[in-house]
Every structure is written in C-alpha cells, then in structure tokens.
Image (cartoon, rainbow, N blue to C red):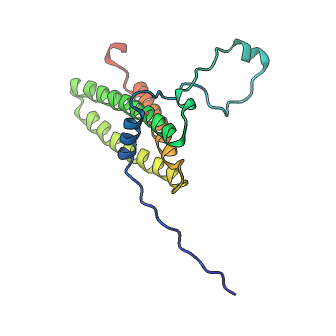
Amino acid sequence: MRPSTVAPRRLSHAPAATLLALAALACAGACRPRTHAPAQEPERGRAAQVAAPAAQTDPCDTVANQLALTSCRGEGARRAEAAEAERYARALGVLRQKGAASQAVALERAEQKWKDYRDATCQAAADLYAGGSVAGLILVDCRARLATARAAELRAIYPDEASR
C-alpha cells in the first residue's frame, strides 16, 4: 500500500510592517525592549555572580498571553528600527554635507540591500513557525535584533562628525 502524500498548506503572512504596526497599537507605549541578558548565558562562578550587577527586568516578561508578548516585543522592534533609521539618516546627512555624493549613493544602496536581507531573514525565521502563535514573536524579535546590530554597525562605520 502506497502512503498518500499531502502537499503542505501555504499560509499567507501579513507584511512585517503591518505586524509591527499592530504590535505597536496593542502595546500602547507600555512595553520596553529587552534589557537583560538572555537565559542562555553560560553559568558563571559564584564570585562573578556576586560582583555582577543585578539583571534588569524585562517588562515583556510579565505580560499575560502570547498576543500581549508579541505586542510588547513589537513595540521594542519599532523603537530599534526607528533608532537604526535615525542612525542611517545621520550618516547619509554627513556624507551629503561633505559633498561625498558617490559614498552617499553607495550607502543608500547598502541600506536597501540590508533591508532586503532583514526582511528575508526574519520572514524565513518566522516561517519556521507558520500557523503557530509564536511566528509573530519570532518575526519582531528578529527585526529588533537585526536593527540594533545595524545601528551599531552604522555608528562604527560612520561616526558622528563631532567625534572625528
């Protein structure tokens, strides 16, 4: 007897921007981005634990359900993406102010490619949980993590004019 094969269902996904907007509305400013170290941190000796400052509490850890958690983290992602966009705009402004038109165009191209990478990477991560309640959380956490890293990268490559 031959086993039947069933084609997997393709679930449609709301665009990431829509998820972030819904998350921001549901959060209504009461959420904060994660500020404590992840639980996967390697165990340290007793002396290091005593000397280390207490980990800050993540307000998202106290939410009542998955939707509220996704909303809370979505607000953190929105803030991280706003900080990245501000850092990008600042770098682009400095290049234009200096008359470095070709470098400004190169940065614009790089930013668009980074956004394409971010969108594809985070959607692929969320797709691993398609149909599950955690998919949206995976998406917004990914976007927050990548935006924070990109802002730091832009800060390192294009320091503020005053710091030169």
Residue at 47%, 34% (x, y): give it: 72
Q: Is residue 154 above or below residue 160?
A: below
Pick whichever, 42 or 55, lies toward us: 55
Instruction: Give x and y (percent) for residue 53.
Output: 64, 14
Q: Is residue 87 above or below residue 67?
A: above
Instruction: Give x and y (percent) for residue 51.
Output: 70, 12
Q: Is residue 88 above or below residue 66?
A: above
Q: Quadrant of the N terminus?
A: bottom right
How many numbered markers are drawn? 0
Residue at 61%, 27% (x, y): give it: 37
Residue at 42%, 33% (x, y): give it: 27
Q: Quadrant of residue 13?
A: bottom left
Decide if residue 111 is on the left or right side of residue 71: left
Pick whichever, 103 or 52, lies toward us: 52
Q: Is residue 90 above or below residue 125?
A: above
Pick whichever, 72 or 121, lies toward us: 72
In this view, the residue farthest toward the front is 64
Q: Quadrant of the C terminus?
A: top left
In this view, the residue farthest toward the right is 46
Instruction: Give x and y (percent) for residue 66.
Output: 53, 42
Instruction: Give x and y (percent) for residue 84.
Output: 38, 31
Residue at 32%, 36% (x, y): give it: 107
